[in-house]
Amino acid sequence: MKMRKRTGFFSDVWCQLVLRLKLFLRDRATVAVFLISAACFLFCMADLNLSAEEKASIPVGLVCLDEGEKAVSLTEELKQASALYVTEGSYEELEERLFDGLLRCIIVIEEDYTKKLQKGNYRNVVSIYHEESDQVASVIGDIVAAGMMYDVCLARGYKAYEKLPEAEQAKYTKEEYKAYVGSLLGAEDFDFAFEFRFVENTAGGQEETKPLENSLFYRQAVAAIAAMLMTLLQLTTMAVLQLERQQGITKRRLLTSMSKGAVFTGNLLANTVCSVLLALLFAFSVGVGIKAAEKIFPIFLISLLFSMGMAVVYYILAQCLKSVLAYQIFGAVWLLVSGISGFFYMAEGILVPELPGLIKALPNVVYLDYFTRLLL
Amino acid sequence: MGAILKNDFRLLWSGKRAGIVIALVLLLVVGAALVSWLPQEQNAPAGERVRIGVVNQDESLYAQMIVGYFTENPVFTAYVSVIIDEEDTIRQQFDAGELDMYMVIPKDFADSMVYLEHLPIQTYISTASTTKALLLKNLMESYVEYITAVEVNCVALYDAARAIGLPKTTAQTANEKLTLELILLIMAKDNFFEKQVVENYTAVRLVPYYLHEFCYLLAAFLALLAGVRFQREHHAGIYRRLAAMGHSAAAILLEKQFFYMLLLTLLFAVLWGALGVAGVTISVAAFGYFCLNVWFLCALMLCLAAAFQKLQNYLLASNMVILLGAILGGGLLPLMYLPENMEKIAQFMPNYWFLKQIFEIENGVMKQEQYIVFGCFGVAILLLLVIGAVIYRKKEGRVYENA
């Protein structure tokens, strides 16, 4: 008897699942909108994930007015700095981008940069054009200074060398001295002045993790956006249940002695199947972006679980609210609140104070936390 | 059309709808209060939020100068608060999660630079908050370059002096002098730059950026509800009956557009007023531009509602249009961080034009380009209404029978 009941339950779940999928796939407009959305989703996720490494940096404009050797080397240094995303051009072009909100500031390497540096004169050799109260300009100054420091110190070092008294052998020429310092720079002993260790608190104590990349922050933002889109899919697909409830279809279905649990499970599974495409697209684009195929499946799995969690939330909303208007209002509010909580998680401790436990328990925050741990 | 408009306003105060309108007004007022609270929160010292510990085992002047750099540099202290203590105490605080990072300046660190031994500063960064860890990593990495530059040049001078046959003491004296000179140079690195303020330029901060986007999304979701009402009235056969009375599809859509334009403008005027009372002033021009965007969103949602046969299809399409429009239009990830391809597409998104223009208008910058954008929005509203009316007229009867 028990066995029959169980078989009946699974058979009901299967019927509900097939019914829901058939209804979804037979509606051309729904399928068309879904496919267009999925294509847009793929485009956004692929573009964002593939550009994560360069776009995670601070966007700055660079004008080089000096063609000398030192200016060229500083330009290269800045282009390679992981904290900066450099756009080169004329001052006018870059100013336009600054006004359009596409740059944070403009760095101008002045005309006589190389000459001044070779003479050991380093005052005002670079100009930084920025907004009056922008503190980030100072941080950018620190990064640019790091690129200049070796040349400035070299010029000072050679001056000190020139001042040394004469000895048994002839002094190095400037070129020889430069070459010697250059050879030291590549030596193992000068690889690092800080030894960074990234530590994670785990149940078993503290563990060292691999070094963090700037792109991690960008990928978190992309995951927060993907989470919002996956939530939106659940909001819109579960709206059908609300409409069916209004039309009395839900009540009629119960007359067929189908249990509420079977209907719920069938609907949940159908929504999960619909979410597979988005979760897969997201996991794949992240996996390709970080060049780690082994991460695709875990990311896919947590994305799918997150979608299922959201489906449960919207199922409850669809069951509790009497009109589709109220469902849309509460659904959109939940989408925005949970979506914003994901961004708050990223800015916690920097732009916003420490998040209360309630916000930390929201699905988007939990999802982002797992996502981040997977990337670490 | 006037009669239908009057009726719509009258119905607004009947039954549950009045409750919804009052709830919305209250929500907007609470939102305004929150907005006026946010800037105060933003002004809280950021240095309180990121905490690092420094263990200085080196008593030399150079090490003191390095520590002084961390504690006195306004750029550093703007982000970070520094605690200097013994290693055990600092380690305990780090293990308890009270510190985000700690570093140990080893004994004889400065001497190692002078006497050519390499002793790195041990730096432990907690990954409990990856954002803080990344911020600290980037701050520290620029200092790596400074120390390496000093170290390499000091060693080079010593080696070069010894290579030409100078006695060890002379080489060491020169080395010590250069080390001090270069450390002082690092301290004065601000002299490398001439910092110039760009006139008539105000950078957009993240908090106002997202608040504006939030208002835009709120307006979009409210406009979406206008489409839901349109679909429900349509399925109830109301427009069919109106058509029988001689009202064309275009007239019905135009009336709905007027009604929701007025309603949403009134709602946002309440928000505008509440913000003003709370001390956040927004210029009339900026509010006007926001309203133009709201009207456009109403037209877009009504056009979608007229185009789709089923409510569920409309909900799927309109929700996706809002969120994908926000993503592609730089609403969720600020424009400067969008990849190149998305940046190109963003220029076709209303969300992009809203964010691009609103801050300029708020800063009092009025350019010819803005009038073109206003004109484009006006034309787009009319076009959407015409398209909506044409599509709606074609499928009018069929939909009613299916409802």
Image (cartoon, coloured by chain):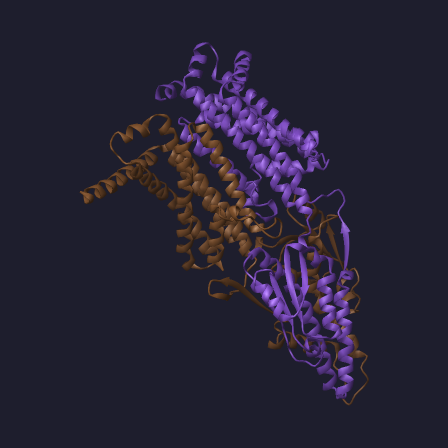
Please identify the residue farthest to the top as the structure is shown.
Answer: B245
Q: How many marks?
A: 0
Question: Which quadrant of the view contains residue B392?
Answer: top left
Colour assigned to chain A in the rendering is brown
Taking B358 as reference, is B175 left or right? right
Q: Is residue A223 visible?
A: yes
Image location (x, y in percent) of residue B401: 35, 19
**x 55%, y 14%: residue:** B6
Examine the rendered structure and indicate whether residue B232 appears above or below residue A223.
above
Examine the rendered structure and indicate whether residue B48 appears above or below residue A159.
above
Taking A240 as reference, is B115 left or right? right
User: Which residue is at the front of the view, A199 or A53?
Assistant: A199
Quadrant of the snapshot with the C terminus of chain B: top left
Examine the rendered structure and indicate whether residue A51 appears above or below residue B124.
above
Colour assigned to chain B in the rendering is purple
Q: Is residue B375 visible?
A: no
Image location (x, y in percent) of residue A178: 71, 75
Please identify the residue farthest to the bottom as the structure is shown.
Answer: A168
Image location (x, y in percent) of residue B309: 40, 26
Examine the rendered structure and indicate whether residue B212 appears above or below residue A175.
above
Question: Which quadrant of the view contains residue B95?
Answer: bottom right
Image location (x, y in percent) of residue A341: 53, 45
Question: Which quadrant of the view contains residue B139?
Answer: bottom right
User: Which residue is at the front of the view, B162 or A239?
Assistant: A239
User: Which residue is at the front of the view, B328 or A216?
Assistant: A216
